Amino acid sequence: MIQDLVVYVAYIVYAIAVLMTFGTLLTWVERKQSAVMQDRIGANRAYVRLPFTQIKLIWLGLFHGIADGLKLMTKEDWRPKTYDWYAYAVAPWVCFVPVLLVFAVIPFGGLMVPAKLFPSLAGFFGDRAYPMQIARLDAGILIVFAFGGMTIIGAMLAGWSSYNKFSMLGALRAGSQMISYELVMGLTVLGLILIYGTVDLTTIVQEQSGTLLGFLPAWGVFHQPFAATLFMAAAIAENKRIPFDLPEAESELISGFYTEYSAMKMGLFMFAEFIEIAIIGALFTTLFLGGCNLPYMSDAGFAFPGGSVLPMSHGAVVVTQLVVFLAKVMLICSFQILIRWSLPRFRYDQVLKFAWKFMFPLALMNLVVTAVLAWMATSP
Amino acid sequence: MKPYPRKVYWNEPTMGWWERAYLFEILRGLGITSAVFLRNMWKWVTFRKGALTTYYPEETRWDYAPANRGKHVLTQRPDGRPQCVACNMCATVCPAKVIEIDAGFDPADAAHPKFPIRFEIDYSRCVFCGLCVEACPEDAIRMAKEVPGLPRYDRGQMWIGMEELLTWNPQKDVAKPYPTGGTRAEKRGSH
């Protein structure tokens, strides 16, 4: 049992480190990527001066995220005269914590056997094997949706308790928008559940190893390209980022439901948003891009279709899987930032019309077609 | 009564099924932006500059107009002293009131007994209108194409004094012939 504790504590530390790193790094990636997209240079001024020297490390502006964090932490924590200061204080955390919790059920690697990884500890670990996932729950996807749906409570609380018309309007918008898009998101994932016959994320990832039609990797995006597109759109709407950032809508609502927040409370909302980019990336990777799977790769190493085999040690496989997962997540994050800096904002009525009259029927159609195909494939 | 008929100057754009389907046009837009991204990124990773903007203080734009007038020059007499007679006309005409002159008295030079001890321009407030150049009766102040190296951490550091104004781009007033026969110092010595 103590072995389990050691492994899972290590997983939790890894997960938190990854999420925090993504949260800080993505602020930099967003700045730099948008700058390069717009023929600009981007963040390049914050520096760390080596003590007792005049050497200033700029590193392409990588320290701007740290500068932001320091600034937010040292700013005055201004509070509005609200009747419900408790809800006001707790709202950023209600937004922030569920975002972190979603990662608990996402598998970020394949199977790890500690005894093979560290031969000197073989006596301690025995022949235990752990899937690289903090909590392997049967209800994987359902947990994701349960926690994902909780962030809206934070947004509503913030808007309600700020005692401000703009916050209130932002919260109302956030509520209707997120509920609409959550529905679409659930429906798009149902198609995958039909195909794989499970809601357990580890099994879904395992099902995505191997190839489709002999050459395509058997990833969800090739099974359900339509659902993948809809899922991406709905996920960005869930995250309230720019084509769908109606709850914040600077030009109309100042900053929507967190207008009255300052200092690190406001920072928590921003941080939650950036971590959610990574979470969406991780979720999309898990459901549609085969998680930590590379094509032609199994737990023993690579086996190419030409018949050539490249065996790998267990340690190399584990590291490759971790890196592949992170690389895919980073790619999806970058894609989301590309969308955010390319598309203009919807109008509010357009957002809801888009959800209910466009994406919802499409998701239903996708589900029906998938159901019929799955039935035809299984029935004799 | 019918409303006043308005002239239609353009055709209202209508969306076909292609635009109505969102996805295709969105993909086209993403293609455009990612093409720009990849082009610029390729320039950066091959050690070229992939941006139109500049790292301002370290790097100035190459395309300043030839007629740009950004930094002042104090012209010199042949002996190297400022041509300025500290008449304060530039400081008076200056709309931003950025020129400060302290005048001194030199009885030895009968032609120009008044001269500037201190001549400073506050570039944090200068509007670069060029009125000082127009006002000067002695052609003692001119403006040149360069830009003053402005960025500082403190407004107080954005003053440029007589020393730099005389020396950063030394110009002599060639329009006014001066009697040759030695510098002023030599003359004074001969008295």
Image (cartoon, coloured by chain):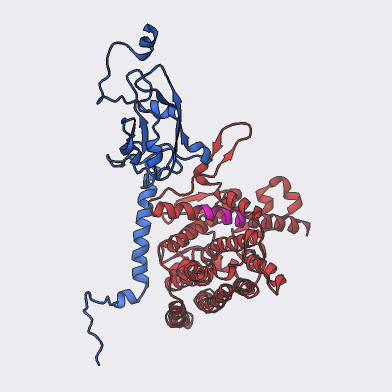
The magenta stretch spans residue A27: yes
- Whether residue A4 sits left or right of residue A157 in the image: it is right
Return the residue nearer the eye: B141 or B105. B105
Return the residue nearer the eye: A298 or A9. A9
Q: Main secondary structure of the magenta part?
A: helix
Q: Is any part of residue B147 visible from this angle?
A: no
Percent across and percent down for residue B54 are 39, 44
Q: The N terminus of chain B is located in which quarter?
A: bottom left
Query: As displayed, is residue B48 above or below residue B141?
Result: below
Q: Colour of chain B?
A: blue
Return the residue nearer the eye: A256 or B29. A256
Q: Colour of chain A?
A: red
Q: Give the magenta-colored segment's residue range.
A: A17-28
The magenta stretch spans residue A54: no
Q: Please name the residue shown 70% across and 74% down the image.
A: A84
Percent across and percent down for residue B187 are 35, 10
Looking at the image, the residue that sits furthest to the right is: A2
